[in-house]
Image: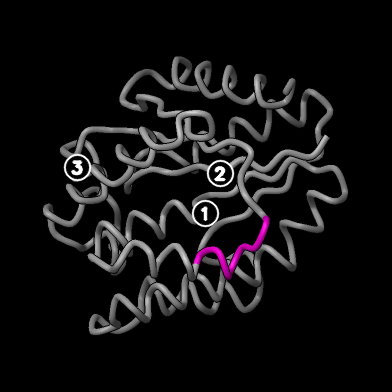
């Protein structure tokens, strides 16, 4: 059966690790799994990703918003919709909730305008389930500091990431049926167990 699952969270929350673990478990259960990421996931999207993450520091918030959704529009139509139509489980490392939080809450863009552009980019394609991995701000800072290099987003100040944390918390509260907030500052197996509970429930519904 097809299922569209997105993973969200601040920098260093462990999305990549948990997507990999979930992919293995789903495949072991016989599911065909497609893993994609944002921004990126297509030839044009990967070019946009380079610009967004490593482009000029003076790239405006408005340009970020439009570039993110240009990449997203291509990904939805070129990869996500065909995969879902073929009965695959699609796991996406970030989707439109990241834009709501990073460009909306983080950069301070008008929420209604952000939503309108997201709606235009994705159309009727919406996640069936969103896993929000939550870690304390201090842990995120330590993990970002240990990385070899930082991109335009990772190098933002503490106030920016506090707004990100608050933005995700508000989203989770507003859509509890879709967004499952999981404390990711725990042993790997415990976090994986919570993720699987949410995913297995979505597969049965």
Mark 1 lies on residue: 95
Q: Based on the displayed image, in which of its 4 quarters is residue 105 positioned?
A: bottom left
Q: Residue 161, image x and y in percent? A: 20, 51
Question: In terms of depth relative to the viewer, which is nearer, 198 or 126?
Answer: 126
Mark earlier in primary sequence (1, 3) = 1
Mark 2: secondary structure: strand
Placement of 34 over or under 117, stated as above or below: above
Instruction: Look at the picture and state if 184 lies above or below 34.
Output: above
Nearer mark to the viewer, of 3 and 2: 2
- Report the magenta stretch's main SS: helix
Residue sitting at 48 percent across and 72 percent down? 49
Q: In the rendered image of this protein, does residue 117 appear above or below residue 32?
A: below
Percent position of residue 91, x then y = 63, 44
Which residue: 30% across, 67% down? Answer: 110
Q: Which residue matches tag 2?
A: 6
Contact? badges 2 and 1 (CB < 8 Å): yes
Whether pointer 1 and pointer 3 mark residues with C-beta atoms closer than 8 Å, the reply is no
Q: Is residue 89 left or right of residue 157?
A: right
Left or right: where does residue 65 sit relative to residue 200? left
Q: CA distance from mark 1 to mark 3?
A: 25 Å
Specify the quadrant that holds the N terminus.
top right
Measure the alpha-carbon separation of dots 2 and 1.
Answer: 6 Å
Residue 142's disc number: 3
Query: Could you say where residue 142 lies in the image, as x and y percent from the top left?
Result: 19, 42
Graded by Cα atoms within 10 Å as few (under 14), some (14 to 19) or many (20 or more), the crowding at tag 2 reads: many
Q: Gap in Å between the C-alphas at discs 3 and 2?
A: 25 Å
Q: Earlier in the sequence, mark 2 or mark 1?
A: 2
- Give the residues in magenta: 118-124
Q: Secondary structure at mark 3?
A: helix
């Amino acid at each position: 059966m097809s299922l569209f699952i997105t993973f969200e969270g601040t920098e260093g929350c462990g999305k990549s690790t948990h997507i990999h673990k979930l992919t293995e478990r789903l495949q072991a259960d016989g599911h065909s799994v497609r893993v994609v990421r944002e921004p990126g996931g297509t030839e044009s999207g990967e070019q946009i990703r380079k610009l967004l993450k490593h482009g000029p520091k003076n790239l405006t918030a408005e340009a970020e918003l439009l570039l993110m959704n240009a990449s997203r529009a291509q990904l939805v139509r070129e990869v996500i919709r065909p995969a879902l139509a073929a009965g695959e489980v699609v796991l996406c490392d970030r989707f439109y909730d990241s834009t709501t939080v990073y460009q909306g809450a983080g950069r301070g863009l008008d929420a209604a305008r952000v939503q309108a552009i997201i709606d235009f980019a994705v159309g009727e394609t919406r996640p069936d389930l969103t896993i929000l991995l939550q870690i304390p701000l201090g842990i995120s800072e330590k993990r970002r500091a240990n990385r070899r290099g930082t991109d335009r987003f990772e190098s933002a100040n503490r106030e920016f990431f506090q707004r990100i944390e608050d933005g995700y918390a508000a989203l989770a509260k507003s859509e509890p049926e879709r967004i499952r907030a999981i404390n990711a500052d725990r042993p790997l197996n415990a976090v994986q167990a919570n993720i699987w509970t949410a995913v297995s429930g979505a597969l049965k519904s």
